[in-house]
Image (tube, grey):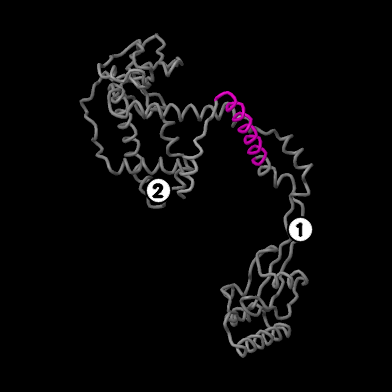
Amino acid sequence: MKRYLLVFSALALLFGCDKNAFDEKADENLQVVPVVLRETGAKTSVGKEKAQANKLANATVVTVTVFQASTQQPSAKVGSQLISLPIHTPQDHCTSNDLALVGGIPVPTTEFYQLFAQPNLDTLPSYLRRDFDKRRGEFITQLINNKVFEYAAAHEDFSGEKGYAEAIEDAVHKVNLEYFYDRYINIKGDVSDKEVKDYFEAHKSEYTKPAQFRASHILVKVAPNAYRAEVSNAYTRASELRRRALEGEDFGQLASAYSDCPSKVKGGDLDFFTKGQTHPSFERAVERMSIGDISPVVETSQGYHVIKLTDRVPERTLSFEEIKDELKNQLALRKTGEAYEAVLQSLTNKYKVIRNESLIRKLVEQY
């Protein structure tokens, strides 16, 4: 879903923007390295401080720092953590993997392929896919234009803007949570092939494919509130159709001509089904039949049926190859769940949790 929205948003941006959306007279010396997170008051090694940042004392905010090509390793502070940032060395020409250079910094082809990978495109509605295929060149231009805006924005200091610090802090919390899960919980979900095989051998009897039946039928429908005479006439009609089938008339042709079920367009064929998917009376009749048999008239809540069994597949135990991927996912989810509970227990022992049960109950009772 995220990938779909990402592609859709990009399409909307492309089709709604002027191709000349940026000023061709933009700063030719634009050279940018990523946004720097820091605590207000912390000194950046390169860049300009703005006075309004001081109004947000003790808040975690963002100051954008523009790093020129340098041998100095830039760094930034998020809370008490020091983060080293990569040095971007400007290039003077495009390599075979660069879509363009913006201020000497490459826009790599990978950015295009990540956004418009084939699986992502396959999820698009056909009309959007056609537009994309026709306008790939414009898409690439927009991708490059967006990079110009991104780098230009990196020259700005938004730390004094309303809500900026909170937005960045929220983003940091979300990213930290994601990495925390990957480090302490999701990684525990790794499952070896041996674990999967051993589990399968110990629980083999639990993995069976139920018996399947394939049948065709002729339905003479009876309304729930039908009069007794109507019920009797329906039964007589079903019995007559059964007699004609037993005497050798083609069952499929009889179903196509006389059945009240939508399956009549397929000669009454219901395809394969398992126990629990049809009416109990219908199932009991089928279970007693051999391939090619025509049943007595069977009554269900729909009316009267004449059934012909056309195939059956007995119950069987699934092979390891058939079930191994599903088992691996199940075991991974189980291990992840166990890790989640263990880590949560450890953390709640470390960080005391005090629940406001009266407020929680009030909120729950609203729904």
Q: Is residue 219 above or below residue 63?
A: below
Question: Tag 2 or tag 1, which sits nearer the N-term?
Answer: 2
Q: Main secondary structure of the magenta part?
A: helix
Magenta region, residue range: 329-351
**Residue 315: assigned label:** 1
* Amino acid found under the numbered disc labelled 1: Glu
Q: Could you say which is closer to the camera, residue 313 or residue 342?
A: 342
Count of numbered labels shown in the rendering: 2
- Give the residue type that dot 2 points to: Arg
User: The residue tagged with tag 2: helix, strand or loop?
Assistant: helix
Residue 211 position in % (x across, y down): 74, 61
Q: Give the residue drawn at x 37%, y 45%.
A: 132
**Counting other residues with Cα less than 10 Å from the Cα at mark 1, is it few (<14), some (14-19), or many (20 or more)?**
few
Q: Kindly report which numbered mark, 1 or 2, lies closer to the viewer in this rendering.
A: 1
Residue 11 in the image: state x and y as whole percent: 35, 43
Residue drawn at 70 percent across, 47 percent down: 322
> What residue appears at the point 52 percent right and 34 percent down from the top-left corner?
355
Q: Quadrant of residue 44?
A: top left
Verify CB contact (< 8 Å) between mark 1 and mark 2: no
Please determine whether, in this image, residue 95 is positioned above or below residue 295: above
Q: Which mark is residue 129?
A: 2
